[in-house]
């Protein structure tokens, strides 16, 4: 069984384009500790695309800087750090989420989880996958296409049920903004923006093959699956340029 720590040291921070990246050997373990101690936490999974977007969106940049945990999700972020003498392991958001769920599944008590986002049916299908894997989990699921009235009802439900771990898959930057605006509803919870992870768990999309992931080409597979993203992918060469010539 997972051994938790009675105290949680603050992680070291490495700046990437003036955004904080927190350095830990085991992010899931650190978050599990935070959850046990009821320390509300916003987790941001930073990649090159988000970093460039933050340079153009002051609200997003502010949210990232205020988050209790920013993990190096993208290969570009890892490269940026390596060019400045720091070797660190990449932490893809979907793998962090899965590691945390599996960690909670090994605990003696039951945990309440929330999946929010995706098209109608997606969050429910993702929840069914994890409920079958870990029956001890209690999972609340809601799609991300809510009217204003239904959104208010959903917020009231979150406030009433107080899920301990909340995954928000609304895409960047919408999910980060939504978490910032609503985390007061469940102040002791862990909130994580998970992008398209719900689609993958629901079987609507697939992750890149391990060969592409291991060779920093996951972005290419995402472009293949979603060619409409090509304009957003222009952030990658911008980030690469800044990685080579920006000293911040």
Image: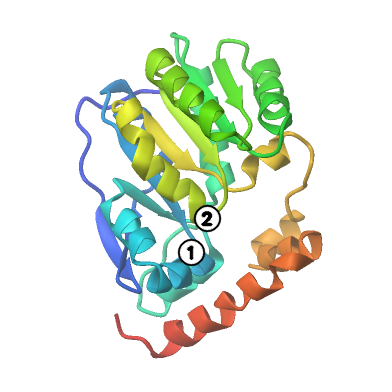
Q: Nearer the viewer, residue 162 or 102?
A: 162
Colour pattern of the rendering = rainbow
* Residue 96 versus residue 16 in the image, above or below: above
* Residue 148 versus residue 228 in the image, above or below: above
Q: Residue at x 62, y 71 (%)?
A: 232
Measuring from the top left, give residue 126's x and y in whole percent: 68, 29
Q: Residue at x 57, y 76 (%)?
A: 236
First in sequence: mark 2 or mark 1? 1
* Residue 233 versus residue 89 in the image, above or below: below
Give me the C-alpha separation between circle 2 and circle 1: 7 Å
Quarter where residue 39 is shown: top left
Q: What quarter of the picture does the N terminus occupy?
A: top left
- Label 1 belongs to which residue? 50
Secondary structure of the residue carrying tag 2 is loop
Res. 172 mark: 2
Measuring from the top left, give residue 44's x and y in whole percent: 42, 50
Of badges 2 and 1, nearer the viewer stands 2
Q: Residue at x 48, y 64 (%)?
A: 50
Q: Counting other residues with Cα less than 10 Å from the Cα at mark 2, is it few (<14), some (14-19), or many (20 or more)? A: some
Q: Residue at x 57, y 43 (%)?
A: 95
Measuring from the top left, give residue 193's x and y in whole percent: 49, 44
Q: What quarter of the picture does the C terminus occupy?
A: bottom left
Measuring from the top left, give residue 226's x and y in whole percent: 76, 61
Left-right relation of 209 to 85: right
Quarter where residue 247 is shown: bottom left
Res. 161 mark: none
């Amino acid at each position: 069984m997972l051994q938790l720590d009675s105290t949680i040291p603050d992680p070291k921070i490495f700046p990437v384009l003036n955004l904080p990246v927190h350095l830990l050997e085991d992010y899931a373990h650190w978050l599990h500790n935070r959850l046990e101690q009821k320390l509300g936490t916003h987790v941001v999974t930073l990649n090159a695309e988000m970093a460039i977007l933050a340079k153009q969106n002051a609200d997003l940049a502010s949210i990232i800087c205020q988050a209790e945990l920013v993990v190096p999700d993208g290969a570009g972020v890892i490269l940026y750090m390596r060019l400045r003498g720091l070797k660190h392991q990449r932490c893809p958001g979907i793998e962090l989420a899965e590691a945390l769920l599996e960690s909670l599944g090994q605990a003696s008590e039951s945990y309440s989880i929330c999946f929010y986002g995706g098209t109608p049916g997606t969050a429910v299908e993702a929840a069914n996958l994890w409920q079958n894997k870990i029956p001890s989990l209690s999972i609340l699921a809601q799609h991300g296409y809510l009217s204003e009235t239904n959104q208010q009802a959903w917020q009231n439900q979150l406030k009433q049920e107080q899920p301990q771990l909340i995954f928000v898959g609304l895409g960047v930057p919408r999910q980060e903004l939504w978490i910032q605006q609503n985390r007061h509803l469940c102040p002791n919870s862990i909130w994580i923006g998970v992008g398209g992870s719900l689609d993958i768990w629901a079987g609507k999309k697939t992750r890149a093959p391990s060969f592409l992931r291991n060779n920093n080409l996951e972005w290419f597979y995402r472009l293949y699956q979603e060619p409409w993203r090509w304009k957003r992918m222009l952030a990658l060469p911008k980030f690469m340029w800044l990685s080579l010539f920006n000293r911040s």
